[in-house]
């Protein structure tokens, strides 16, 4: 016997005129959880069943006993219902309903929960004895006689026992029901993926859950029974109530997926969101790199990419960088050439196109075509950015819209009553043109006033063009001659910015501004206003290099460095007025021998900073000029003569190889002595202790003790 609890919940709610959201609020659970009670995918807790029974003024077993039918009566306030001793589970902490309060269903709610049949043991919900309600307390001085009082106590006791028995049966039934739940989690009809437009067809799930198709779609029977539909070009997907998917690509991987709650058809791949917040994908490898995604609440697919929106509003992507920096996303909208994000605050950000959505607000749905975007506000109002005036006029006139979808040059909408509307290309008969006649646009005779006072302001990065507004103007068009590489988008503000990189310094440009009306039936566009403007690139001179220092490096090079200059790309280095050396670093190493550098020699140094390229807004710096001394590192050489009486001396020498007679000149020798081995080679690599042999000079020879220097 099928479980009739979901059916009874639906009957009670609809009989008393409540929406699913109303009851969810009363029981203090999310509406998504309450919907699961009505479609049978989960069941309430015992305390919640007790609360619902009290609220509707019935006994709990009337809800869970399949053999009993609901008897409708006046709903009491929970606060006024009598206490049932054996049902003392906590009641949800919510403000109670007034006894006579009747709620109107939510205007937006057009989805009835789809009933699902479940096979359950017929003994699960066996009939039980009805609960006995405790009598109201007697008034003061109205005291019954003792036999009657004892009889009342017996009735109360029997009622409590009967109620306890019913509760035990109920608990057992709930446990069996939970243990016998099917593998897949049923999916209810909701506001997700109700309308989809492909290249030759339209798919729409109406208020009754029936699939409507228009155009050329060959798999209607296969998709029948879907609670969600998604399309991209010739590819379509459907989501069934059992959490599985159907797919026109006949992909065996897709048909094996289960526990799905949302689908997304891309151009050449299929994606789906599972109940646990992960995403599965098959097809385009680049688009299907989604295995690491977690905590996803919605998934969307496009041409070679997949978009996921997490519970916290951040966006994850595969195959694209679109919207990857969004942190407050609620929904995504995919088109052939662009996409958009509907943020939690109701604003819309467009990626891949230059549609102006800056003035849109409270947007709940949107659709992108090849040359337009249409948004739907919370009150069913449409917002349009469209290059086709006729299509824009039609879509802008729609009201009370609930769902919207687009493909190419076609846009389709469904209103809250379930009626379909269309505009744009109707080659495949996706909408009834008789219901969407081309409007007769009355030609206006008066033009908007021209804009005035066009001015220009330059920075190193941009040129900003400003003008005074034109009365009744909706937006402005700005053009430049000679034409720029990228046209300037229309704007609703009274200024635009042109990148300095798009302009040539010294060039004379003609800039034209035209005002366009909000109501094309009332006004003509203004006469264009053209002014000439000579662009002179705004430049900034780079800072002069500072803190120029030098040292002899370990490799023997003369290392000269300076502080890096911000925005500089290269430096020009000049030594002693010689040739320029162009370097990209803020230092240079000079080989000692190549530049004939001598210890303790002084040199003139010049360093100039230059921009990286000619297009840079910066100019070269003033040259920094300094004098630096080339000085090798010196080591201490301690010289000891072999004659104890002749003492020792210390020399400070750079590393190198020396001839002894050039190292120790005559004036350094002890009086009356000469070197015993004047041609001896001495190598200095560091601090050195040097023994030198001397001998008495021959008085008959004139010893030339002059000389010295490196060998």
Image (tube, helix red, strand yellow):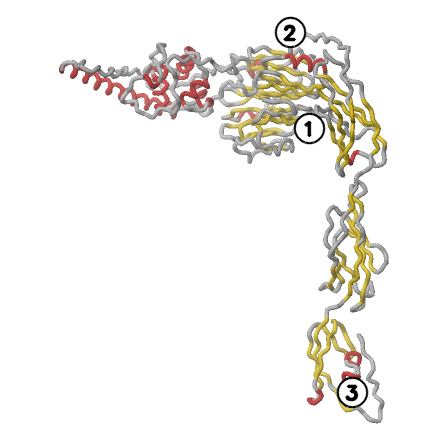
Q: Horizontal and vertical percent for residue 701? A: 84, 91
Q: Quadrant of residue 648?
A: bottom right
User: For the residues marked 2 and 1, what is the alpha-carbon distance in whole angstroms?
Assistant: 33 Å
- Which label number is shown at residue 352? 1
Q: Quadrant of residue 7?
A: top left
Q: Horizontal and vertical percent for residue 502? A: 79, 34
User: For the residues marked 1 and 3, what is the alpha-carbon distance in whole angstroms?
Assistant: 91 Å
In the rendered structure, the answer to whether residue 705 lies left or right of residue 407 reads right
Category of crowding for the residue at label 3, using alpha-carbon neighbours closer than 10 angstroms: few (below 14), some (14–19), many (at least 20): many
Quadrant assignment for the C terminus: bottom right
Query: Which residue is under mark 3?
Result: 674
Q: Nearer the viewer, residue 299 or 21?
A: 21
Q: Quadrant of residue 266?
A: top right
Marks 2,3: beta carbons within 8 A: no
Question: Helix, strand, or loop for circle 3?
Answer: strand
Up the image or down, 293 lies above or below 594; here it is above
Question: Which callout, 2 or 1, points at the residue further toward the start of the chain?
Answer: 1
Q: Which residue, as the protein is rendered here, is positioned at the far bottom?
A: 700
Quadrant assignment for the N terminus: top left
Q: Horizontal and vertical percent for residue 252? A: 57, 25
Q: Which residue, as the protein is rendered here, is positioned at the far top?
A: 434
Q: Nearer the viewer, residue 128 or 326?
A: 326
Question: Helix, strand, or loop for circle 2?
Answer: helix
Query: Which residue is under mark 2?
Result: 435
Question: Which callout, 2 or 3, points at the residue further toward the start of the chain?
Answer: 2
């Amino acid at each position: 016997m099928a479980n009739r609890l979901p059916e009874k919940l639906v009957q009670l709610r609809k009989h008393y005129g409540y929406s699913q959201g109303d009851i969810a609020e009363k029981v203090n659970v999310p509406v998504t959880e309450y919907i699961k009670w009505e479609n049978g995918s989960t069941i309430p807790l015992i305390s919640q069943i007790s609360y619902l029974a009290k609220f509707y003024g019935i006994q709990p077993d009337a809800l869970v006993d399949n053999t009993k039918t609901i008897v409708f009566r006046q709903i009491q306030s929970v606060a006024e219902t009598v206490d049932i001793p054996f049902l003392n589970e906590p009641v949800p902490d919510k403000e109670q309903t007034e006894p006579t309060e009747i709620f109107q269903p939510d205007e937006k709610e057009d989805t009835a929960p789809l009933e699902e049949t479940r096979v359950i043991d017929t003994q699960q919900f066996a009939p039980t004895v009805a609960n006995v309600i405790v009598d109201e307390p007697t008034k003061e001085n109205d005291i019954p006689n003792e036999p009657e009082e004892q009889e009342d106590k017996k009735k109360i006791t029997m009622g409590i026992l009967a109620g306890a028995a019913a509760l035990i049966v109920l608990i057992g039934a709930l446990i069996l029901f939970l243990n016998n739940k099917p593998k897949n989690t049923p999916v209810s009809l909701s506001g997700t993926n109700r309308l989809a437009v492909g290249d030759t067809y339209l798919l729409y799930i109406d208020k009754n859950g029936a699939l409507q198709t228009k155009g050329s779609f060959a798999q209607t029977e296969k998709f029948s029974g879907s609670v969600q539909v998604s399309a991209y070009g010739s590819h379509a997907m459907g989501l069934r109530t059992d959490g599985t998917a159907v797919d026109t690509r006949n992909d065996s991987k897709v048909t094996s997926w289960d526990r799905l709650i949302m689908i997304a058809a891309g151009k050449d791949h299929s994606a789906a969101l599972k109940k646990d917040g992960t995403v599965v994908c098959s097809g385009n490898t680049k688009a299907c790199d989604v295995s690491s995604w977690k905590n996803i609440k919605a998934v969307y697919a496009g041409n070679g990419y997949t978009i996921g929106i997490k519970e916290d509003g951040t966006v994850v992507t595969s195959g694209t960088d679109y919207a990857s920096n969004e942190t407050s996303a609620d929904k995504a909208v995919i088109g052939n050439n662009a996409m958009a994000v509907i943020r939690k605050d109701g604003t819309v950000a467009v990626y891949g196109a230059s549609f102006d959505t800056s003035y849109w607000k409270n947007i709940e749905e949107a659709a992108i075509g090849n040359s337009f975007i249409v948004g739907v506000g919370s009150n069913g109002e449409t917002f349009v950015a469209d290059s086709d005036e006729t299509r824009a006029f039609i879509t802008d006139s729609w009201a009370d819209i609930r769902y919207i979808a687009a493909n190419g040059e076609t846009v389709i909408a469904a209103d809250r009553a379930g009626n379909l509307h269309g505009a744009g290309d109707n080659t495949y008969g996706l909408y009834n043109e008789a219901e969407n006649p081309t409007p007769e646009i009355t030609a206006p005779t008066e033009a908007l006033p021209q804009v005035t006072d066009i001015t220009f302001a330059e920075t190193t990065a941009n040129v900003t063009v400003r003008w005074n507004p034109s009365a009744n103007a909706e937006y402005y068009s700005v053009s430049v001659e000679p034409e720029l590489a990228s046209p300037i988008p229309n704007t609703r503000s009274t200024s635009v910015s042109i990148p300095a990189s798009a302009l040539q310094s010294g060039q004379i440009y003609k800039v034209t501004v035209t005002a366009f009306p909000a109501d094309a039936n009332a006004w003509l566009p203004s006469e264009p206003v053209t002014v000439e403007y000579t662009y002179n690139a705004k430049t900034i001179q780079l800072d002069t290099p500072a803190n120029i220092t030098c040292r002899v490096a370990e490799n023997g090079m003369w290392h000269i460095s300076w502080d890096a200059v911000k925005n500089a790309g290269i430096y020009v280095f000049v030594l002693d007025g010689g040739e320029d050396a162009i370097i990209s670093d803020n230092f240079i190493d000079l080989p000692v021998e190549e530049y004939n550098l001598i210890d303790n020699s002084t040199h003139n140094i010049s360093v100039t900073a230059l921009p990286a390229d000619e297009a840079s807004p910066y100019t070269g710096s003033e040259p920094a000029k300094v004098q630096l001394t080339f000085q090798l590192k010196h080591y201490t050489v301690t010289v000891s003569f072999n004659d104890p009486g002749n003492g020792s001396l210390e020399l400070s020498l750079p590393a190198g190889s020396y001839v002894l007679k050039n190292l120790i000149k005559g004036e350094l020798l002890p009086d009356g002595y000469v070197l015993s081995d004047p041609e001896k080679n001495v190598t200095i690599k560091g601090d050195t202790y040097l023994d030198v042999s001397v001998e008495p000079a021959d008085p008959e020879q004139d010893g030339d003790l002059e000389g010295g220097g490196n060998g």
